[in-house]
Image (tube, rainbow, N blue to C red):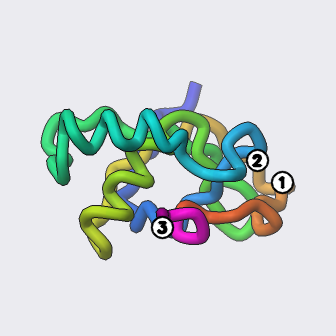
């Protein structure tokens, strides 16, 4: 089994999965902002799949990515690539930046 690969990326560039194509759940986002504010220390790593042309789609962490994108523009987040699908084209999916409230 290959070693997990970690990267620091701008959350605004991450692609949203089809199940969350409208973005983060507004209630969950509000609750997370109230609880954590703009803190990223101790935040769980966002799980992603790498597709064609290096595009990254979120598997777990849409709300966390949205919170950082909204409150800390330009701040990077740590992601772990849990799957590599070089033939899958994620470019048709919206990014977190497209849906930041």
Badge 3: few (under 14), some or many (20 or more) residues near its Cα, within 10 Å? many
Instruction: Tally the marks.
Output: 3
Percent x, y of residue 8:
35, 59
Front residue of 98/77: it is 98
Please give the name of the residue rendered at 56% of the width and 44% of the height, measured from the top-left corner: 48
Q: Give the range drawn in magenta.
A: 97-101
Estimate the spatial distance between the alpha carbons at disc 2 and disc 3, rounded to whole Å: 21 Å
- Locate residue 75, reporting x and y percent: 27, 67
- Of mark 2 and mark 3, the one earlier in the sequence is 3
Task: Please state if 37 lies on the left or on the right of 92 as rendered.
Answer: left
**Where does label 2 land, which residue?**
85
Residue 12 numbered mark, or none: 3
Label 1–label 3 contact, CB within 8 A: no
**Mark 1 neighbour class, 10 Å CA radius: few under 14, some 14 to 19, many 20 or more:** few
Disc 1 and disc 2 in contact, CB within 8 angstroms: yes
Cα gap from disc 1 to disc 3, whole angstroms: 20 Å
| Nearer-N-terminus badge (1/3) | 3
Mark 2 burial class by Cα count in 10 Å: few <14, some 14-19, many 20+: some
Could you tell me which residue is drawn at 58 percent across and 63 percent down?
99
């Amino acid at each position: 089994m290959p070693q997990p690969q970690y990267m620091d990326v701008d959350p605004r560039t991450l692609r949203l999965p089809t199940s969350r194509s409208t973005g983060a759940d507004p209630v969950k986002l509000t609750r997370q902002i109230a609880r954590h504010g703009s803190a990223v220390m101790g935040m769980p790593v966002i799980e992603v799949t790498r597709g064609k042309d290096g595009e990254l789609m979120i598997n777990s962490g849409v709300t966390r990515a949205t919170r950082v994108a909204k409150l800390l523009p330009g701040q990077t987040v740590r992601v772990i690539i849990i799957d590599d699908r070089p033939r899958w084209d994620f470019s048709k999916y919206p990014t977190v930046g497209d849906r930041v409230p």
